[in-house]
Image: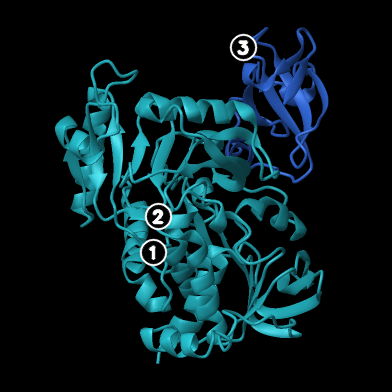
Chain colours: A blue, B cyan
Amino acid sequence: MLITCPYCGPRDVIEFTYQGDGNRERPQPASQDLDAWNAYVYDRLNPAGDHNEIWQHSGGCRAHLRVVRNTITHEILSTAFARGGHKAEGRS
Amino acid sequence: MAEYSAFSLLKNALAGNKDWKPAWRKPDPKASYDVIVIGGGGHGLSTAYYLAKEHGITNVAVLEKGWLGSGNVGRNTTAVRSNYLLPQNTRFYEHSMKLWENLSHDLNYNVMFSQRGCLNLAHTPAQLDDYARRGNAMRHLGVDAKLMNVDQIKRLVPALDVSASARFPVLGGLMQPRAGTARHDAVAWGYARGADRRGVDIIENCEVTGFLRDGGRITGVSTTRGEIRAKKVALAVAGSTGHVMQLAGISHMPIESHVLQAFVSESLKPVIDTVLTFGMGHFYISQSDKGGLVYGGDLDGYNSYAQRGSLPIVDEVMSEMLALFPGLARVRMLRSWGGLCDMTMDGSPIITTGPLPGMYLNCGWCYGGFKATPASGWCFAYNIAKDEPHEFNAPFTLDRFYRGLIIDDKGQGANPRLH
């Protein structure tokens, strides 16, 4: 599997660390909303199909990436920096 | 009289083996059942078997989207053990071990359960201490465990590199002598025949495409072979849990589906007569009765429904094997394959009523589902029949994450790919 890093270009998957479901939203640190914290820590979308996920190019430029990948074919549909998306808030 | 016996073998041999009945029928689905079990793998079949045998519920259908046993029950590395640290897991898996010990007789089907032991190797003093602690926890609950030193390990597995110059020298290990392996296809076939003979309909090539509802209650399923109604609908779909739950309108679960690869080598003369695990990575190996080395390692590490893995893990697994057994460097790998693992957030399974009315859920087996097959079906059948959990599966609820009652044997946290 090749992931195209926006800085480094297409690189082998072994250079990357998987950080899982990119659909989760982390509550504000002071939040006492138990449902929101539970959803952030434990719940996953886990679709059979296109999956929005976070990878880190840990063996390269160390950027966090937002990758859309198909979980049935392993085809990578898009890659972008994770920062900027509202769901990346509080993650960096 | 038992269907398979020395007498029936002789009788059928004299008759030219023309009179054997198929091990299970190929019925068309009826319009309704008392219980539908979705998933014709080990857990679904054992659930149907124990529903019929222990609870007298025989108006049951097992729906399988492919052919019987085409999923993880035929894709695992066949190890059976109950060497856990936490009491919830130990009690459950030890119950499974006890069912394994009588399974061939119970099913009248030889599952070739071979109690050749399972040895976890330790490579650091801290790891050895940890194994001593786990061994004590096991013995405390009546499970067999013993610490082995390097000399004992060397005698048990002469091919293992136990020298001080090994990449990760072996300092000792934790052995569970009653652990072992079983013939995984026979487990599926034996449960299938046992359920079939008690009246259960096993319906292959029947994929569930949606759920029927009456208000909020699940009242059946729509399938590629039509609608089927049932009083109770039980899911035992392992790696496809996320997908099937989405058909029921539940989008989020404390589960990620990952792919795990397994490998088998060309046949060798007997070289490893136990189940061995590496402590400085993630690697396990045993030898099948045909002589092939059966081994595997870590998950590929990202969500997947593909049932096939990628090359970096192949490389890693082979490296780990050679770190333990340099003498196997010239052995050729025969086959590799992948299976889907429903990885939970704490590494422990879910066997519970719900989450929707009329639904029962059995999932989250991570990559330890095979050894659980008897107890999983046994507990799930109890739960379905009585609408309350048995004490062995009571801790394995779906809401334990929310309630802070996680059962994290490895102490890994909510990172499924690391369990």
Q: Nearer the viewer, residue B256 or B2?
A: B2
The disc placed on residue B276 is: none
Amino acid of disc 3 = Gly
Check disc 3 and report the residue beneath it.
A59
**The one of B208 and B339 positioned closer to us in this rendering:** B339
The residue that appears at 58% across and 36% down in the rendered structure is A41
Left or right of B213 in this view: B232: left
Chain for numbered disc 3: A
- Which numbered tag is attached to residue B289? 2
Locate residue A82: give its quadrant.
Answer: top right
The circle drawn on residue B112 is 1
Judged by depth in the image, the label closer to the viewer, 1 or 2, is 2
The answer to the question of whether label 1 and label 2 lie on touching residues, with beta carbons closer than 8 A, is yes
Q: Which of B387 and B44 is in front in this view?
A: B44
Residues under labels 1 and 3: Cα distance?
45 Å
Judged by depth in the image, the label closer to the viewer, 3 or 2, is: 2
In the displayed structure, B309 sits above or below B107; it is: above
Coordinates of residue B53 in the picture (x, y in percent)? 46, 83
Q: What element carries label 3?
A: loop
On screen, residue B351 versus residue B394, left or right, reads right
